[in-house]
């Protein structure tokens, strides 16, 4: 079984955003979104380091 990741999201806010779009939130939806956020942070951090920086900037999250 995979290690459970720390929740980085405000669940009620994420659920409200999904509801605003006219959809319901499944029980595993926030866990999946949280995993994606962890991945984005990892990728942005790698990009910043590859560019000789310790500071993650907005453009580091852009995946092309």
Image (cartoon, rainbow, N blue to C red):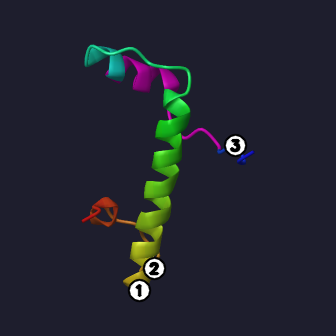
| Residue 10 seen | no
* Callout 3 secondary element: loop
Q: Residue at x 49, y 56 (%)?
A: 39
Task: Name which of mark 2 and mark 3 comes first in the sequence.
Answer: 3
The magenta-colored residue range is 6-17
Q: Is residue 57 magenta?
A: no
Q: Which residue is mark 2?
A: 49
Disc 3: CA contacts within 10 A as few (<14), some (14-19) or many (>=20): few
Marks 1 and 2 sit apart, C-alpha to C-alpha, by 5 Å
Is residue 9 depicted above or below 43 in this figure? above
Marks 1 and 3 sit apart, C-alpha to C-alpha, by 31 Å
Q: Is residue 15 magenta?
A: yes
Is residue 25 depicted above or below 34 in this figure? above
Side of 46 where 57 appears, left or right:
left
Label annotation for residue 52: 1
Residue 56 in the image: x percent, y percent? 40, 66
Disc 1: CA contacts within 10 A as few (<14), some (14-19) or many (>=20): few
Q: Which residue is mark 3?
A: 4
Residue 54 in the image: x percent, y percent? 47, 76
Quarter of the figure that contains the N terminus: top right
Residue 20 in the image: x percent, y percent? 27, 16
Quarter of the figure that contains the C terminus: bottom left
Q: Residue at x 53, y 45 (%)?
A: 35
Residue 15 in the image: x percent, y percent? 42, 20
Task: Name which of mark 1 and mark 3 comes first in the sequence.
Answer: 3
Is residue 13 depicted above or below 45 in this figure? above
Q: Residue at x 65, y 43 (%)?
A: 6
Q: Are marks 1 and 2 in contact (CB under 8 Å)?
A: yes
Side of 46 where 28 appears, left or right:
right
Image depth: mark 2 or mark 3 in front: 3
Residue 60: quarter of image? bottom left
Q: Are marks 1 and 3 in contact (CB under 8 Å)?
A: no
């Amino acid at each position: 079984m995979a290690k459970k990741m720390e929740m980085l999201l405000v669940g009620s806010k994420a659920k409200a955003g999904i509801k605003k779009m006219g959809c319901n939130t499944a029980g595993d939806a926030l866990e999946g979104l949280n995993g994606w956020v962890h991945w984005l942070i990892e990728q942005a951090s790698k990009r910043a380091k590859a560019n000789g920086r310790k500071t993650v900037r907005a453009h580091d999250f852009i995946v092309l």
